[in-house]
Amino acid sequence: MANKSVAFEIKRQANPDAPAVWESFELEWRPSMNVVSAMMEIAANPVTADGRPTTPITYDCNCMEEICGSCAMRINGKARMACSALIDNLEQPIRIEPLSKFPLVRDLQVDRSVLFENLMAVKAWVPVDGTYDLGSGPRVFPQQQEANYPLSNCISCCCCMDVCPQFNEDTGFVGAATIAQVKLFNNHPTGKVFKEDRLRALAGDGGIQECGFAQNCVDTCPKQIPLTNAISDISRDVIIQKAKDFLRG
Amino acid sequence: MAAPRIIVVGGGLAGLAAVIKIAEAGGTVDLFSIVPVKRSHSVCAQGGINAAKNLKGEGDTTAQHFDDTIYGGDFLANQTPVKAMCEAAPAIIDLLDRMGVPFNRTPEGLLDFRRFGGTLYNRTAFAGATTGQQLLYALDEQVRRHESDGKVKKYEGWEFLSAVLDSNGVARGITALDLRSMELRSFPAGAVILATGGNGALFGKSTNSVVCTGSAQSAIFQQGAFYANGEFIQVHPTCIPGEDKLRLMSESARGEGGRVWVPRTVGDQRPIKQIPEAERFYFLEEWFPKYGNLVPRDVATRAIHKVVYELGLGLDGQPMVYLDLTHIDRATLNRKLEGILEIYEKFVGDDPRDVPMKIFPGVHYTMGGLWVDFNQMTNIPGIFAAGECEYQYHGANRLGANSLVSCIFGGFKSGPNALNYASNLPAAQGDGGHAAELARQAEINSKLLKNEGTENPFKLWRELGETMTKHATVIRYNKGLQQADEKIVELLGRYRNVNLADRSQWANTSFAFARQLKNMLELSRTVVQGAILRDESRGAHYKPDFPDRNDEKFLKTTKASFTGEASGPRFEYEEVDTQYIKPRLRSYDATK
């Protein structure tokens, strides 16, 4: 049996100020190969398709089980996780680029710290009194748990933000992931003590009204989080909060 | 006097647990992590976290949890810290619950529990099959809260290189590398907590994440820290073999009723569903009627090896067996196991609700790690360790769902202990050794970057992984282990001839990897040589030439120390604390 090969085109950029170039790679096909295993193969043999030595590719990657959220990139134009991008399901040559909406570090690595800053701004936590033993938590019925669990599955990959037409410097939009976390913590029996703060944080410029309902986020989310539901629920809550704040003067 | 500054290295469960305790006690923390902490390897834990809450009317107790853990670990763990952990576990679950972890619930709204390996009780709290993710996020959120209050400063994207030691050998801080700018810096601290996880990368492919190289542990081992019980490596019975890694298929699959089997006839060509029950070999259930599919991991792994390599019953002659969930209704599977079923679906392409999964054992966890005292401090004053990177809670084999509780418990203990230690630490003389350590690290970096060799570090690593997996996992022979040690020595020699394809000074991943590789090679020798010296079988360490446990000679903690000599580490042995439970024969054929 002749060895099948797999063709890749990978966008390279040595640093944020360097020009971007495309490099082609030709690798031997292996069963259950994915984009990350291809990148590992290139690191062990960093030579382009035309036989020119190059550098291993810089990219983020950690768990390779689509749970750590590291390896988001654009593969054949689609923002997705590289570890779960199986070669056999991709059209060739496989074109790989970094996410497009975040500051580039090098090659396929970008800086997504904006999401963590947003999570801080909306107080995405449950304010427990302390870590000493205060007995059991609030009672939560299975129906509630089943509603919250999907929201809690967000892996902070930022794919939803990359594909959102409104997520850009002009709007300063926080993006779907943060809004879903607001819903999660506002739903929590203790977390909801900050409900008003969170809604106000989403009420101004860059807040929830920037959403243009393109729905790309929910189509792209690798964890199938009900992002558009979260946006409409929180939208409604923000409007109510604004009205309350207005009446209170 | 201002509250001391503590450095925590590693942002998984143990590290974050330590950070929270320190911040809560008024200390300030510099938190270092290679990856954003929310992406740490704890996120991969699936099945659950153990605590004897006894919410199922079974009469479970913390004493029973303690006994299961000690027995499961084949009596190698010191009993005092394990006892304390098991007693603290129920309150840890309550705390996590208060922090908002979406644990699965009973109809009454209470915490639900399921069974895991090595116990007969429903003792494992769980959030679907992504418990580690949910726990990590809960702690990450609490740390973010302390960060917003200015008590925590995160250095994400920085890699720990070494400890800074003063002229008395006392820790005064660390050196670290910014993985983007490649800037080398030293950071002062009154105490350092290492919470740097496992070392699966020594074996090439494992269930571990990319960052689990053991590099930090090895670095301070080479600076004088003892490394304990390194030869005890857990091989998880149920993984999905892959090109890039071995993906874990959680023990919770068996906890929820999953059955392991192979067709009794080699090469049975019938469609799976047409193979009648009588012609299926449920070998775990037959061999271990009491525990069945929920024997501890070392036992299940050896059984699968026997079925595949001795009985020749692997599926289609391949090293694989079935893990079957198809008899359980889809709604239950989705409610309790969806996370792992999705992993199988995404990476293999079959729906495990319809078709039995094909699995095989894979390297998963290190029971061994940095030696620490009962206060979580290593033998280097001021350096503490918590989580998988230290050795003290699991003995010769870890029980499923005990890792999350040991991480959080160890973190909770190390944080206040480090703060207390640092509060009583006299000021350093001079610069506390910072300039000298920085110069040492700068020298290593510059030499590596300029090295004119021919060896690709990633290829060397593959060779290391192959030899380690072949000789130092499920079945061990002294001859093979010896070959592995010789191979490591060869690789250390070739490492001197390493060539970085990338010499740039910006986000250079080859450079960072090559530094880790040197540390991996050094640490591998503690695993291999520790295994050579231990001529017995205990827990995960199994030698067919020495099939029995030998308490007289080896009911002892292995302690390796670095010598810098060609012969490798020096070994000594320490008595195990067995003051509560008298060691007895471990056998899962019947009730213990």
Image (tube, coloured by chain):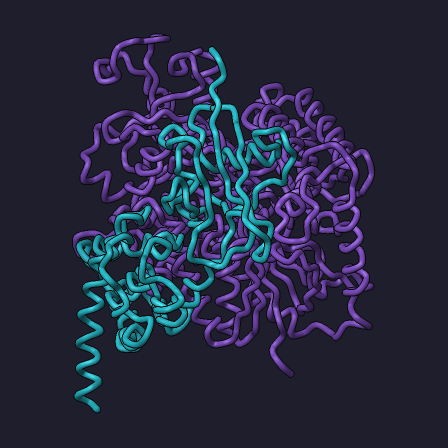
Q: Is residue A7 above or below residue B75?
A: above
Q: Horizontally, is A35 left or right of B292 in the view? A: right
Q: Is residue B553 above or below residue A191?
A: above
Q: Nearer the viewer, residue A210 or B293?
A: A210
Asked if one can make out residue B84 in the rendered structure from this viewpoint, the answer is: no
Q: Nearer the viewer, residue B89 or B591?
A: B89
Asked if one can make out residue B168 in the rendered structure from this viewpoint, the answer is: yes
Tell me the residue at 43%/51% (across/down).
A99
Q: Horizontally, is A39 left or right of A67 in the view? A: right
Total numbered labels placed on residues in the image:
0
Question: What x and y, as percent, mark residue B75?
Answer: 54, 39
Q: Nearer the viewer, residue B330 or A228?
A: A228
Question: What x and y, as percent, mark residue A185?
Answer: 29, 66
Chain identifier, colour cyan: A
Q: Is residue B592 above or below residue A195?
A: above
Tell me the residue at 48%/73% (across/down).
B24
Which color was chain B given?
purple
Question: What x and y, as percent, mark residue B427?
Answer: 75, 75
